[in-house]
Image: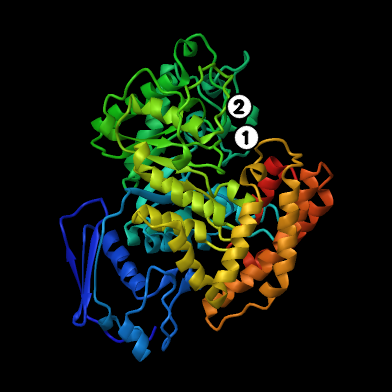
């Protein structure tokens, strides 16, 4: 940026896990006071934000900075002082007089790993998080092997060769980089049932070996039979009424907590499938959620005896959406995680006006709620028995975002949902998402981080400042184009909700296809002297080509035609271009959604 030396002081305030920092800056220098080391770092990034820097995505390729000698602070929120406009000075911080006091509106602000990920993509996201106000990162399982294997084995792209990787080494690097930034560790979640059974399968893979008689006896009795559910340990529930099972479960959790003191939030989840809980006589005496709470109380007691203050995160998910009858003995140990995985993303928390009754629980015959108000009804019932710390674990960027090629509808929904969290009694959000959700841009995560940190950030202002940097002089035209593209497509349909043949959607998708073809020549001619903006425009040119194939495949399915030819064309395009655009588009995950949910 061409800045000269500038004196800065860093003064600690009373230490706290809650983030807080204050920046006071003037001609003589700047002072940043903060509540912890992470907040000091956020304060420095915020200082540069006030100077016009925009952290538009993970990695240095997304760090937009004002070019020396030019006055261009992107967005309507930040306007250059009149004297700078007149003198055409470079960004000399001595001209910036400010007093900024930031105490984030929510404690839980983070991202959870999903998709196919290289070590570099994970570390780039970790580096980006504090730049947009996030304080947490969640590695599912005990190591990220499942997510690394998808990338290094190039599952979904046979054109790329398999590569070797070391999951343990990557995890050590993750720990190091998170520690360097003071980020809060969330860990495990999935995998406890696997550990109890002693299986070897990773992630959602099938187990190759047979269970021992002892392990099989610990599995849930479903339809008169015990064993692995569908052959997948991760999807297999346990016989939670069995004291031996609860003892083994508690041992696994306590051993992990003892050996990983760096983990602040340890997630304790059950199987990742539903309608497969134990039907034995003892288990039938209580609902799965009551067995779950009883087991968590035993874990808490052992952690207390071991002198460990690790927070245990329990979840409202699948059968565990139904609230328990028994209570936590030590509620301060626990954090509630609301995980509405089956929700619609074409409406949000702010639009809810009526809370329906929770349906009766019927063992192994549940139906997951789709409407947002149906999901909130379960949360309200849980809040009657637990009033402690809580956050939402939401899925805006897990599947539904691929149904919004313009990325503005999902970004706006994130902004509105975050605003509603306080009124729902929730203290933030951890996003379960692909890390490479940046096609055509990383606006959704940018909106998430900024809104979680400092409400009120209106969506319009955030979109304006992001697009002003990402697309430069073309920002207005690109905004209109992407907004229209979002309006014409359906996130819920692409996410597998409702019938596949939808004649009512056909005119919208035909209009979207016509729009893409009409704007393609103009997009090809868009260029910028700013190197970061030029990279975004280059990505938009590829995105235009992608959208044409994408919409053709969707239209075939919506009309009830065979989409194989169009789908194969889309797959070939994204596989061919993955080496150039792998940092922003998860080719593995997109194809998985197309196959399993969209059915194209």
Give x and y (percent) for residue 455.
35, 54
Q: Which mark is residue 84?
A: none
Q: Is residue 559 above or below residue 102?
A: above
Residue bearing the label numbered 2: 228
Colouring used for the render: rainbow
- Residue 174 at what x, y percent from top left? 43, 57
Residue at 57 percent across and 41 percent down: it is 202
The quadrant in which residue 274 appears is top right
Q: Judge whether 537 appears above or below 218 on screen.
A: below
Please state the horizontal and vertical placement of residue 102, each as a whole percent of the image: 27, 59
**Is disc 2 placed on a helix, strand or loop?**
loop
Q: Dots 1 and 2: beta carbons under 8 Å?
A: yes
Image quadrant containing the N terminus? bottom left
Residue drawn at (32%, 80%) of the image: 81
Percent position of residue 106, x then y: 33, 48
Instruction: Give the residue pinned by disc 1.
Output: 207
Closer-to-camera residue (107/472) = 472
Nearer-the-camera pick, 591 or 461: 461
Q: Considering the numbered disc 1 on the image, is that residue within a helix, a strand or a loop?
A: loop
- Mark 1, residues whose alpha carbon is within 10 Å: few (<14), some, or many (≥20)? some
> Looking at the image, is mark 1 or mark 2 earlier in the sequence?
1
In this rendering, does residue 88 appear at all? Answer: yes
Q: State left or right for residue 7 relative to residue 4.
A: left
Outermost residue, bottom direction? 87
């Amino acid at each position: 940026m061409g800045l000269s030396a500038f004196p800065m002081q860093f003064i600690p305030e009373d230490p706290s896990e809650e983030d807080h920092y204050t920046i006071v800056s003037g001609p003589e220098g700047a002072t940043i006071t903060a509540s912890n080391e992470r907040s000091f770092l956020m304060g420095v990034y915020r200082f540069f934000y006030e100077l016009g820097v925009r952290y538009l995505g993970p990695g240095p390729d997304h760090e937009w900075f004002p070019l020396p000698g030019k006055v261009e602070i992107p967005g309507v929120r930040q306007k250059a002082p009149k004297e700078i406009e007149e003198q055409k000075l470079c960004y000399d911080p001595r001209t910036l007089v400010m007093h900024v006091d930031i105490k984030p509106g929510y404690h839980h602000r983070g991202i959870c790993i999903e998709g196919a990920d290289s070590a570099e993509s994970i570390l780039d996201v970790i580096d980006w998080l504090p730049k947009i106000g996030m304080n947490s990162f969640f590695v599912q399982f005990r190591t990220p092997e499942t997510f690394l294997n998808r990338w290094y084995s190039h599952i979904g792209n046979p054109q790329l060769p398999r590569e070797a990787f070391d999951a343990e080494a990557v995890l050590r690097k993750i720990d190091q980089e998170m520690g360097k930034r003071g980020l809060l560790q969330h860990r495990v979640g999935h995998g406890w049932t696997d550990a109890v059974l002693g299986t070897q399968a990773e992630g959602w893979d099938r187990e190759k070996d047979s269970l021992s008689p002892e392990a099989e006896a610990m599995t849930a009795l479903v339809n008169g039979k015990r064993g692995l559910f569908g052959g997948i340990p991760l999807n297999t529930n346990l016989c939670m009424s069995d004291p031996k099972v609860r003892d083994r479960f508690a041992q696994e959790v306590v051993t992990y907590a003892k050996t990983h003191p760096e983990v602040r939030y340890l997630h304790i989840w059950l199987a990742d499938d539903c309608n497969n809980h134990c039907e034995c006589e003892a288990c039938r005496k209580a609902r799965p959620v009551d067995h779950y709470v009883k087991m968590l109380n035993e874990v808490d007691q052992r952690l207390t005896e071991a002198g460990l203050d690790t927070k245990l995160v329990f979840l409202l998910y699948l059968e565990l959406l139904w609230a328990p009858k028994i209570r936590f003995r030590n509620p301060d140990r626990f954090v509630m995680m609301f995980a509405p995985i089956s929700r619609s993303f074409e409406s949000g928390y702010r639009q809810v006006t009526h809370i329906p009754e929770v349906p009766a629980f019927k063992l192994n015959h549940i139906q997951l709620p789709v409407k947002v108000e149906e999901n909130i009804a379960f949360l309200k019932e849980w809040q009657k028995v637990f009033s402690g710390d809580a956050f939402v674990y939401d899925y805006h960027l897990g599947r539904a975002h691929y149904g919004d090629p313009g990325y503005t509808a999902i970004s706006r929904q994130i902004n509105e949902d975050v605003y509603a969290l306080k009124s729902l009694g929730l203290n933030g959000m951890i996003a379960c998402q692909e890390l490479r959700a940046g096609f055509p841009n990383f606006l959704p995560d940018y909106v998430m981080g900024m809104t979680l940190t400092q409400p009120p950030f209106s969506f319009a202002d955030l979109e304006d400042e992001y697009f002003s940097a990402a697309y430069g002089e073309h920002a207005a035209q690109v905004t209109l184009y992407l907004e229209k593209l979002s309006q014409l497509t359906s996130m819920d349909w692409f996410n597998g909700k409702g019938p596949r043949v939808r004649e009512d959607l056909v005119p919208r998708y035909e209009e979207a296809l016509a729009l893409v073809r009409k704007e393609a020549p103009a997009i090809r001619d868009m260029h910028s002297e700013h190197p970061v903006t030029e990279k975004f425009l280059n990505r938009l040119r590829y995105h235009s080509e992608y959208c044409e194939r994408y919409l053709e495949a969707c239209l075939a399915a919506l009309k009830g035609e065979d989409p194989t030819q169009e789908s194969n064309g889309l797959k070939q395009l994204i596989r061919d271009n993955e080496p150039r655009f792998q940092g922003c588009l998860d080719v593995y995950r997109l194809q998985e959604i197309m196959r399993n949910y969209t059915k194209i």
